[in-house]
Amino acid sequence: MSEMPFRDAPLRIGSWRSFWRRFSRRRLAVASLFMLVLLALAAAAQPLAVRLLGIDPLAIDLYGRLAGPTMRHPLGTDELGRDLLLRLLQGGQVSLTVGAAAALVSALIGTLIGLLAGYRGGVLDRLLMRFTDSVIALPLLPLLIVLAAIDLTKLGVPRALADAEGASLWRIVALIALVGWTTVARLVRGATLAVRSFDFVRAATALGAGGPRIVLVHILPNVASPMIVATTLSIGNYILLESVLSFLGLGIQPPLASWGAMLTDAQELIGTAPALALYPGLLIFVTVIAFNLLGDGLQDALDPRAGQG
Amino acid sequence: MIRFLGLRAVEILVVLVIMSFVIYALIGLMPGDPIDLMITANPKLTAADIVRLKAVYGIDQPLMGRYLAWLRNILQGDLGFSRLYSQPSVTILLPRLGNSALLMGTSFVLALAIGLPAGIAAARRPHSLLDHAINFACFAGISVPSFWLALMLILVFAVALGWLPAGGLATIGDGGFVDRIQHLVLPVATLTLASIGGYTRFMRSAMAEALRQDFIRTARAKGAGERRVVLHHALRNAMIPVVTIVALSFGTLFSGALITETMFAYPGMGKLIFDSVMGNDYNLALAGLLFATLVTLLANLAADVAYAWLDPRITYR
């Protein structure tokens, strides 16, 4: 978890130009942004590549398994003879979607809880924050493994829905969001408490502005910067979490692939086909480090007071 | 202070009881139940047998009743019987606890021994080449998936070079001191590399913050040497947040150990939890998860105590 010093003054996003001037000085962050856009475009273009190459990405070809790079298969084939490049791109779609969706849902839940605690204050605040602290204090991965292993049909979810093709993707998004909202909740609560006591908010209250208006117009814009940073950093974390769970067989289920799930099969063949283990892991690594460097750069650009020196 | 500790202890107990119920309920939601497994193992079971078996194991009772019965057993020191190992859970847990403590303890000490000095070095010369290099290395350490790092280490050092064993606790029939150490190298390296980046970054930011304070300028003005300023004046203040965060990171270390132990087939608590959850070994999974929760909560308490102890400005009502 990255710490986010929130000073008592509100952190407004300045004009776009001054933001861009500060951001573009951070060469690593700019390179990361470029890298991520490239990866996302490549992953999104996978269906196009399928049509262009004329290969069925799910077609199993046991005579052509574990083949080296050829013109037809630029990165070779996997243990079932499927094209490795197309599979990596499809895995990228899944990993990036899970990371971004989980970060968005977590941010949404965290914002609601943080606003509720910070704006209402009192007993509700104390209760919600104790709850948040307790969730943070739990051993995350062991619990996620149990949560990922439960049988949804025992909770009354229809079998058809629980076994649907995309179900494992949304299931893992929900699981991550279930434990991931705490960072944003604490951030938003702290900022709300700070902003609430500022004169301009008190003036707005005195002028008769209601709760929703105060929250939307005065508080949310002031917590936008730390939230953008925290959410960017969390995408990287969630891609890591997804890859671990999928690797352990508890995340993305076939025929969907994610980079973590691809590594499960590669583990068995590490001696004969090391390339199968190399590429998906390298892609996870590059994506996560890019999100972390981008978040770090954004923090400097959005909040010049933090992280000086 | 005593009052504060007492309150926190009660709080931990409450969280633990709530979590034990949540975990108990969740385990019951995993696919299949013990009776299903018996039916698969023995197709001759009749419907009457199944009803009788459910009564024997108490599975026909409502959830709350089963939970309370289990809780009573736990409190009497009875962790139940492991289905996978056909032994009492305690006999399985204890040796693995020692193995995990060895793995986690070694990695923890190593990560701190490398990470803290690196963080201090980076903070002393902000924006220097060294600072940027350390910062990038930290980001790399935080961002690398530890299971993949383990795979790559196995690929290089066990498969390609053949220098080190790929997993396990010891070679069967050997188990000498050198053999044990050889089996520890790769798991310890993985867990250390996975946690070192976070510690370094925290140390760097705490040290940079401390070096910006007025009393540092005063110390320099009064002629204190650079070594004394950094190690005596700044470090003591910078350590306060670092100690807290290091104690809080214990839960993360547990998650890392789960992955590392599973990757290297190292018989510790993390692998035990994973195997017992995947193998429907309810009693063992419950005991393991509850233990992991307890240890993490205690580490949090230790963080609070350390904070109060190190910073004389903090008083707890």
Image (cartoon, coloured by chain):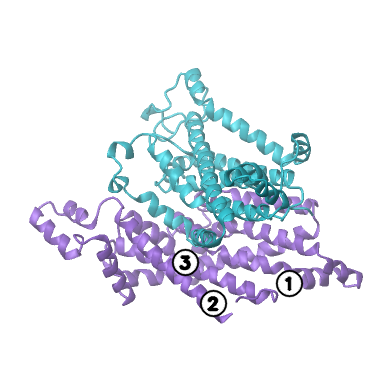
Chain colours: A cyan, B purple
Q: Is residue B268 visible?
A: no
The residue positioned farthest toward the bottom in the image shown:
B2
State whether residue B130 appears in this view. yes
Residue B64 marker? none
Crowding near pointer 2: few (<14 within 10 Å), some, many (20+)?
Answer: some
Type of residue at label 2?
A: Leu
**Residue beneath the point at 84% across and 66% down:** B214
Report how far apart the C-alphas of labels 3 and 1 lie in the structure.
31 Å
Neighbor class of circle 3 (other Cα within 10 Å; few <14, some 14-19, many 20+) is many
Please state, as top left, top right, bottom left or bottom right, where the N terminus of chain B lies in the image.
bottom right
Which residue matches tag 1?
B236
- Can you tell which of label 2 and label 1 is closer to the viewer? 2
Precedes in sequence: disc 3 or disc 1? 3
Which residue lies at the image location 46% right of the left edge and 43% below the top edge?
A173
Q: Residue B100: give its label.
A: 3
**Front-most of B193 and A232?**
A232
Q: CA distance from mark 2 to mark 1?
A: 24 Å
- Above-or-below relation of A45 to B14: above
Determine whether label 2 and label 1 are within 8 Å by CB. no
* Residue B122, horizontal then vertical, whole percent: 75, 58
Q: Position of residue A143 (x, y in %)?
A: 42, 56
The disc at residue B5 is 2
Indicate the quadrant where residue B239 lies.
Answer: bottom right
| Residue contact between numbered discs 3 and 2, judged by CB atoms under 8 Å | no
Classify mark 3: helix, strand or loop: helix
Disc number lying in front (3 or 2) = 2
